[in-house]
Image (spheres, helix red, strand yellow):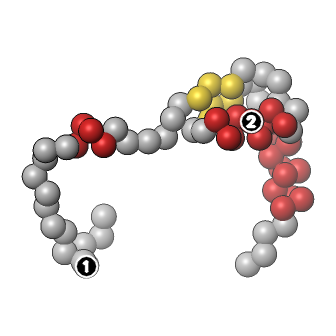
Amino acid sequence: MRIDLAKVEAEERQQLRNADVAIVISEQLAERWRSLGFARPITLVPNGVDIDAYRGLERVEVAPEAKL
């Protein structure tokens, strides 16, 4: 499958033209949208996991055939 990057960017620009605000998961995405001309508010909501919250928990092995 080939991805036509020009079409993807054109669609991205169209969606941004219609948006009043944007919520992004990374500073890089916010920078990209700004570079495409998006001048409205952008809120950064990091998409991550606080691994410290899981330290000390019992480790459980999952069978390879388990579908998570």
Is residue 18 visible in this depiction of the protein? no
Q: Quadrant of the N terminus?
A: bottom right
- Residue 9 percent location from the top left of the image: 84, 52
Q: Is residue 19 above or below residue 36?
A: above
Q: Quadrant of the C terminus?
A: bottom left
- Residue 7 percent location from the top left of the image: 87, 59
- Disc 1 crowd rating (10 Å Cα; few below 14, some 14-19, many 20+) is few
Viewer-nearest residue: 67 or 30: 30
Q: Is residue 64 above or below residue 54?
A: below
Is residue 67 visible in this depiction of the protein? yes
**Relative side of 63 to 3, left or right:** left
Viewer-nearest residue: 7 or 47: 47
Query: Label 2 sits on what residue type?
Result: Glu
Of marks 2 and 1, the one in the foreground: 2
Query: Label 1 sits on what residue type?
Result: Glu
Q: Is residue 3 above or below residue 53?
A: below
Q: Residue at x 24, y 72 (%)?
A: 66
Q: Residue at x 14, y 57 (%)?
A: 59
Distance of mark 2 from mark 1, alpha carbons?
40 Å
Farthest-out residue, top:
41
Disc 2 target residue: 31
Question: Could you tell which of marks 2 and 1 lies nearer the N-terminus?
Answer: 2
**Relative side of 13 to 48, left or right:** right
Q: Residue at x 88, y 32 (%)?
A: 37
Farthest-out residue, left:
58
**Relative side of 7 to 48, left or right:** right
Residue 65 disc label: 1
